[in-house]
Image: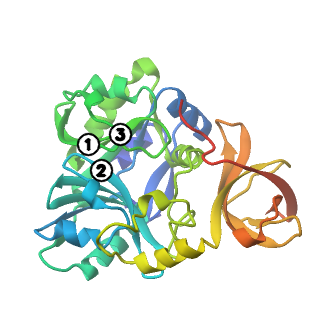
């Protein structure tokens, strides 16, 4: 991990007993007190994550809106200042270059949140396609990002916030919220299937805010959480991870992300023709949920078979679900080869699995 990057909270993670691993080129905490404990805390109260490895970019200029419309799959016309949107960058074949969040700061000013491992690739992709009066700037080094997730997140964060957090609806944000006397961009999007907030703050204030949030959450038992729980939480909620449910060989239609693909919008965008053709003919593959009947945990890359023993796809993400107390997985499978029965090859064993509806978990 000698060449991996470190977030502004790297030193303080050791104080809290973090187990550090390399992820996407970063040294990140995989857990502090244990993945299951952290997972359950987010489901019942709240947990605090360091996600400062995520990338940020600023797109500005007189042509920022019209140009971004040609780059992303969703329709930016539905945005307004203070509103955020989930969308995707696609290549000409309809594969996913990356998924991202776009925050509209003003009519010609957009704040993009990019996947950590893809930040440089995304910035290069955007800059290489830039046209007209458009500026694409990597501002990742300017921000630390804390995510407080769970049903008690609003109660906890309100104790140290001057903003009425109830006024921030899902996929809305306030660009200048005062949190513990620090000016931050505070949004309400989430990646766990629970309510929660993202706090974008200056890197110099990250440790101060980390400690303040945990102190504010002591009555609810809020604890620091690592990427391990973040992965099991997002997987239960059927939220995609780049490199698993989506990549440049998987279309958003195959991945079940058609809600973020607006083929009817006025602007053409990269990949639109391929996606129109795919939608007209129907995707060749689809993302399904599987629950193991036989004993075994499906892992990413495990082969999925039909009842005739034919390979029909593979597990994209699999784990033991702490919420369901069951072994589950998402799989990308060829529709034409499905027979209604599913088997997963795990360590040379062929184990039966049952199809289940996605997501595995929905908050009450």
Mark 1 lies on a secondary structure that is strand
- In the rendered view, does 327 fall on the left or right side of 212? right
- Residue 173: which disc? 1
**Disc 1 crowd, CA 10 A, few/some/many (<14, 14-19, 20+):** many
Cβ–Cβ under 8 Å for marks 1 and 3? no
Tell me the residue at 63%/64% (across/down): 286
Q: Nearer the viewer, residue 213 or 68?
A: 68
Q: Secondary structure at mark 2?
A: strand
Question: Which sits earlier in the primary sequence, circle 3 or circle 2?
Answer: 2
The residue lying at 55 percent from left, 47 percent from top is 228
Label 3, secondary structure: give it. loop
Q: Position of residue 135 (x, y in %)?
A: 16, 71
User: Which of the two discs, 1 and 2, labels the residue nearer the N terminus?
Assistant: 2
- In the rendered image, which quarter is residue 68 located in? bottom left
CA separation in Å, label 3 and label 2: 9 Å
Q: Tell me where residue 136 sits by quadrant.
A: bottom left
**Pointer 3 residue:** 170
Crowdedness near tag 3: few (<14), some (14–19) or many (≥20) residues, C-alpha within 10 Å: some
Q: Position of residue 53 (x, y in %)?
A: 37, 56
Contact? badges 1 and 2 (CB < 8 Å): yes
Is 93 in front, or is 345? Answer: 93
The residue beneath circle 2 is 84
CA separation in Å, label 1 and label 3:
8 Å
Quadrant of the frame with the C terminus: top right
Residue 190, picture quadrant: top left
């Amino acid at each position: 991990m000698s060449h991996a990057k470190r977030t502004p909270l790297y030193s303080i993670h050791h104080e809290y007993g973090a187990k550090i691993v390399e992820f996407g080129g970063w040294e990140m905490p995989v857990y502090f007190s244990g993945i299951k404990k952290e997972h359950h805390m987010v489901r019942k109260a709240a947990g605090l994550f360091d996600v400062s490895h995520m990338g940020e970019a600023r797109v500005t200029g007189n042509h920022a809106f019209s140009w971004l419309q040609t780059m992303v799959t969703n329709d930016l016309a539905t945005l307004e200042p203070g509103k955020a949107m989930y969308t995707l960058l696609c290549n000409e074949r309809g594969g996913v270059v990356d998924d991202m969040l776009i925050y509209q700061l003003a009519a010609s000013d957009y704040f993009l949140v990019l996947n950590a491992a893809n930040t440089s690739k995304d910035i290069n992709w955007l800059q290489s396609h830039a046209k007209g009066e458009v500026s694409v700037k990597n501002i990742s080094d300017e921000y630390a990002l804390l995510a407080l997730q769970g049903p008690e997140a609003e109660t906890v964060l309100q104790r140290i916030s001057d903003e009425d957090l109830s006024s921030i609806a899902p996929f809305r944000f306030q660009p200048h919220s005062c949190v513990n006397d620090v000016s931050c961009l505070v949004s309400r999007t989430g990646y766990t299937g629970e309510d929660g907030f993202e706090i974008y703050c200056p890197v110099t204030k990250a440790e101060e805010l980390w400690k303040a949030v945990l102190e504010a959450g002591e009555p609810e038992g809020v604890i620091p959480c690592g990427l391990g729980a973040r992965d099991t939480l997002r997987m239960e909620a059927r939220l995609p991870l780049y490199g698993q449910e989506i990549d440049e060989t998987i279309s958003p239609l195959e991945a079940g992300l058609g809600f973020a693909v607006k083929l009817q919008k006025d602007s053409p965008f990269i990949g639109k023709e391929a996606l129109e053709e795919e939608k007209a003919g129907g995707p060749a593959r689809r993302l399904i949920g599987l629950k193991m009947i036989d004993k075994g945990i499906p892992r990413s890359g495990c082969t999925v078979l039909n009842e005739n023993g034919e390979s029909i796809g593979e597990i994209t993400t699999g784990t033991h679900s702490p919420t369901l107390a069951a072994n589950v997985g998402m799989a990308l499978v060829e529709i034409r080869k499905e027979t209604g029965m599913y088997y997963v090859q795990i360590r040379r064993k062929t184990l039966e699995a049952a199809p289940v509806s996605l997501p595995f978990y929905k908050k009450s």
